[in-house]
Image: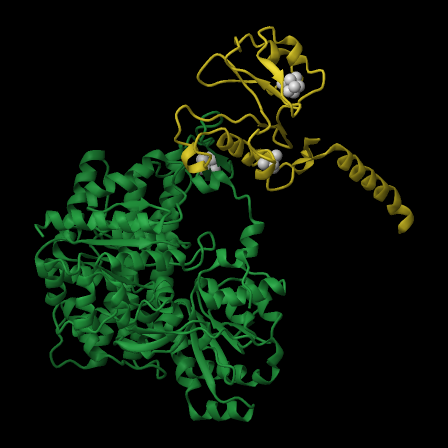
Amino acid sequence: MKELLIRAERCLGCRSCELACAVEHSTGKSLLSAINEKPQPQYRVHVTSDGNSSLPLQCRNCEDAPCLTACLAGALHRDARGVVLCNSDLCIGCWMCLMVCPFGIISQNHNERRIVKCDRCPDREIPACVTACPSGALVYREINQESREKRQQVLKKLQTPSAK
Amino acid sequence: MKISEKVKSQSVDPASREILQLAADQEIETVWNRLEKQQPQCGFGELGLCCRICAMGPCRIDPFGEGAQKGACGATADTIVARHLVRMIAGGAAAHSDHGRRPALLLKEIAEGHNQDYTIKDPKKLKAIAGRLGLNTENRDIKELALEVATIALNDFGKQDENTLAFVKAYAPKKRLARWQKIADDLSALSEKTIGILPRGIDREIVDIMHRTHFGVDHGPLSLIAQGVRAAIGDGWGGSLIATELQDVIFGTPKIREATANLGVLDKEQVNIVVHGHEPVLSEKIVELAATEKMQELARAQGAKGVNVVGMCCTGNEILMRHGVPIAGNELQQELAIITGAVELMSVDVQCIFPALAELSQCFHTHFVATSDQAAFPGSIHIQFEEDKANLCAERIVTMAVKNFINRKPERVQIPAFTSQAMVGFSVEAILEALGGTPEPLLDAIKSGAIKGVVGIVGCNNPKVTHDYYHIELAKALIAKDILVIGSGCWAIAAAKAGLMQVETAKDAGPGLQQVCEALKIPPCLHMGSCVDCSRMLVLAGALADTLGVDIDDLPLVGSAPEWLTEKAISIGTFFVASGVSVHLWPMPPIAGGAQVTEILTETAEEVFGGAFFVEEDPLKAAEKMAEIIAGKRLALGL
Ligand code: SF4
Ligand code: SF4
Ligand code: SF4
């Protein structure tokens, strides 16, 4: 299964992922139509920045997710893809999930006292934020492939001094 | 040659498709590849919501309402969008008008006897201009008159008083001039702040934009856009118009003639020189020099049959209109010309020239020669052009091309076998001549409904739109509705290549337009010249309005820039709208992030100027909308 991974060192803080996320969660699915929709579409990835570095954060879909345990209303559940989703008809706006989520990715629906969270773009093969990122800070790939590549990089680093 | 689906989606032009396929097969990079690598493009930029005006920025406004709604200084989305938009107008007006400065300076040099390389080819036109400017033209020495006209033109660029430009007063229809003054008065009263619409100095209005869009000056969307309009009028009825009129004086006013268009004009057996860019000053000389026996002889000595000069983009349009020099293509074909492997030399001046040509030409035997002090292209050969040594410079360039013929690699030469014939040269003078001397026959045709109205299509190519697709489909749809199409720039080249500029094409027009075209022996799509020649369309509209005793916005006219890309197109669109002509644009300009700006341009403008912008992606729907606008104007005129 593919996972959505972050390469924080590549993030430019351009917030293209946020725009693309809002467009994906709009009716018209185009930037030009989305900005005029009522209710306004909301993005579910948030770029957090301290002026030096930026971090694009969206739901990590934790195994043994604390939010799932904390949701007493039964609104949060996991779908076949392994993605944690919220059934907003059941959400009672208790904010328990927000309190227990280690990443702060639960936000409020602009129009109602309910949560909004990343659904990993059920209609898309590759999540919108990943496609939108111009610098490759967001990737969607198999974990094994990612680990393999990381190990290759370690190998390269260790080889550099002797190669010289 | 098998053309891939991808290449088909890039261009509808068969010659371009052939070379694009060749480029794809040989992995030669073109603008389409580079644009692809630019994806995804920034949504803030697309909406006009990114401000880089000061070093607190870049500031971005969140179009989804969650994040920042103001820049660090407090600028709102509309302020940011409006500032960016009017800076685009400033860029476009500057490019057109600085081009116009050149023939004005040259005319002065000729009149004062400082330049021996150029002459006044059309004294009749000079007199006509002088007459409009209110100068005495009876029994005048031509050079003396030329000096007076050049002085007035140059004064319009740099004068510091508050009066309206002399050229605007001399050319804009009386009713429109009065309307602009009234608009300025009304807007000033409404906003309790002085707002000007009539341009005072061509350069000044552009500098004014740069000033008021500097950090912390003008933040009012309306006030900013009004200044954009002022600079754009200074372009259309000022800088661009001066360029057109004085180039006609120096190089001759275009007359109706036949010419050939598309990449097939490159000749396998001759030395091929492509002149690309926007100004006719040097290209006129290259055409002249290449035709001399000396150069033809030199070419034969190199084993070529002769020297073949062809045009590209608006430099090409200038010499096409005046001499019938074949035109190799429009903006998106500049790289393709070099990829044919048959170009010995491409000479460029200013505007719309890809810097990528330098690297590309190094993969071929082509010499890529830059000539303007304003335009450097790293990797090019630079031959500095100076007006007073024009012959010398042109000779150097032609000689360099001829001597490069032996380096051509015949195995790399692939010239697409596509050309089209086109009837070109429709200056206002030429149109009036075809009409028998007055605009009456055209007005009669409009009144009778044989011609429902006129649409002016202008502007660039943009690889975001399938090359030439929108230009051609829109023009075809319009002529089928009995709407006469006139135009300039890359549209005109697209139409010429597609065979829309032939008298026979009248058969594809509606019955009314067909009859008019056949009677007058003109095509249903008229080539009016280069981008500065959009001023010819204004002058024509002015002549129609004055003859009928109405204002331009009463007339059934619409404008369009359906594949636009440059800031110049935004300036052109703005002076059309300011003159009372609604303008269609595609792609969407970067204004959608500013709701108020969008409203001013698409709605308020209609009430104020009698014309507004509209955006439409589909050519057939755009044609429908234009027909609707035209029907509305006809109804109001009682037709
Ligand atoms: S909402 Fe937070 S806790 Fe729940 S799965 Fe996503 S990241 Fe984990
Ligand atoms: S699109 Fe990529 S670079 Fe831009 S903010 Fe998001 S993660 Fe960072
Ligand atoms: S001018 Fe204002 S909005 Fe623009 S970058 Fe500076 S602070 Fe930001």
Judge by depth and name the residue closer to the eye, B100 or B424: B424
Q: Is residue B353 above or below residue B35?
A: below
State the residue at coordinates (50%, 70%): B337
User: Quadrant of residue B350 in the image?
Assistant: bottom left
Near-viewer residue (B514 or B293): B514
Say which quarter of the image contains residue B237.
bottom left
Relative image position of residue B521 (x, y in whole percent): 21, 74
Residue at the far right: name it: A162
Q: Quadrant of the N terminus of chain B?
A: bottom right
Residue at 76% across / 37% down in the picture?
Answer: A145
The residue positioned farthest toward the top in the image shown: A72
For image coordinates 68% across by 13% down, the residue present is A66
Q: Which lettered chain is shown in green?
A: B
Q: Is residue A62 left or right of residue B297?
A: right
- Name the spot of residue B339 as percent of width and height, x first: 56, 70
Q: Is residue B167 visible?
A: no
Q: Is residue B347 left or right of residue A132?
A: left
Image-quarter location of ligand 1? top right
Q: On the rendered structure, is B132 left or right of A89?
A: left
Tell me the shade of chain A: yellow
